[in-house]
Amino acid sequence: MTCKIERLASKGNMIMLRLCGWIQVEHVKTIRELIEQETGKVALDLREMTLVDRDVVNFLAACELKGIELRNCPAFLREWVTSEKAADSRGASLINSCLSLPVSSTGDRVP
């Protein structure tokens, strides 16, 4: 199965990006660009993800550290993201290596 990304508007100023299928490192740039295009809060719906690469897990961990909500995260993926964040106790290298999105303390994107 390939990667599929759907953009869904939610209540308020929330945008949901639904990630489906096998998400690989080559998809991270596209996901990052889609997140950067948004001006409000962004959440990632992971319910339909089936496989991921380790680099994608690091990216998702960095997203979460930056205030992007990971919704409907499968148990295997939640455990892996939590493990990656714990391995990088300060979170700084995850954020610096995977995500360069300025986000406010409320989780809103900073223009």
Image (cartoon, grey):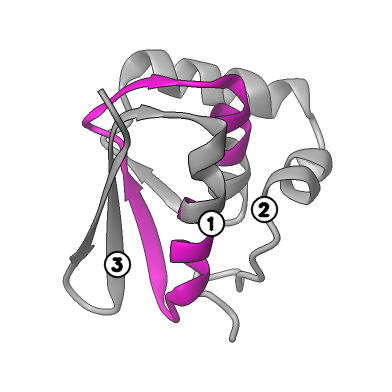
Mark 1 touches mark 2? (CB < 8 Å): yes
Label 1 to label 2: alpha-carbon separation: 7 Å
Label 3 to label 2: alpha-carbon separation: 18 Å
Q: Nearer the viewer, residue 6 or 71?
A: 6
* Residue 86 in the image, given as x and y percentages of width and height: 70, 23
| Residue at image location 23% in from the left, 32% down from the top | 47
Q: Where does the C terminus fall, quadrant-wise? A: bottom right
Three-letter amino acid code at the position of disc 1: Arg
Neighbour tally class for label 1: few under 14, some 14-19, many 20 plus, Cα within 10 Å? some
Q: Which one is in front in this view, the residue at disc 1 or the one at disc 3?
A: 1
| Residue at image location 52% in from the left, 63% down from the top | 33
Mark 1 touches mark 3? (CB < 8 Å): no
Q: Where residue 15 is drawn, which disc sits there?
A: 3
Q: Which one is in front in this view, the residue at disc 1 or the one at disc 2?
A: 1
Looking at the picture, does residue 41 appear above or below residue 28?
A: below
Q: Say which label, 1 or 2, has the lower sequence index.
A: 1
In what element is the residue under mark 1?
A: helix
Q: Which image quadrant for residue 21?
A: top left
Looking at the picture, does residue 15 appear above or below residue 43?
A: below
Q: Residue furthest bottom?
A: 111
The residue singled out by tag 2 in the image is 99
| Residue at image location 31% in from the left, 22% down from the top | 74
Neighbour tally class for label 3: few under 14, some 14-19, many 20 plus, Cα within 10 Å? some
Q: Nearer the viewer, residue 31 or 45?
A: 31
The residue singled out by tag 1 in the image is 32
Q: Say which label, 3 or 2, has the lower sequence index.
A: 3
Three-letter amino acid code at the position of disc 3: Ile
* Residue 78 in the image, given as x and y percentages of width and height: 43, 23
Q: Which residues are magenta?
A: 31-59
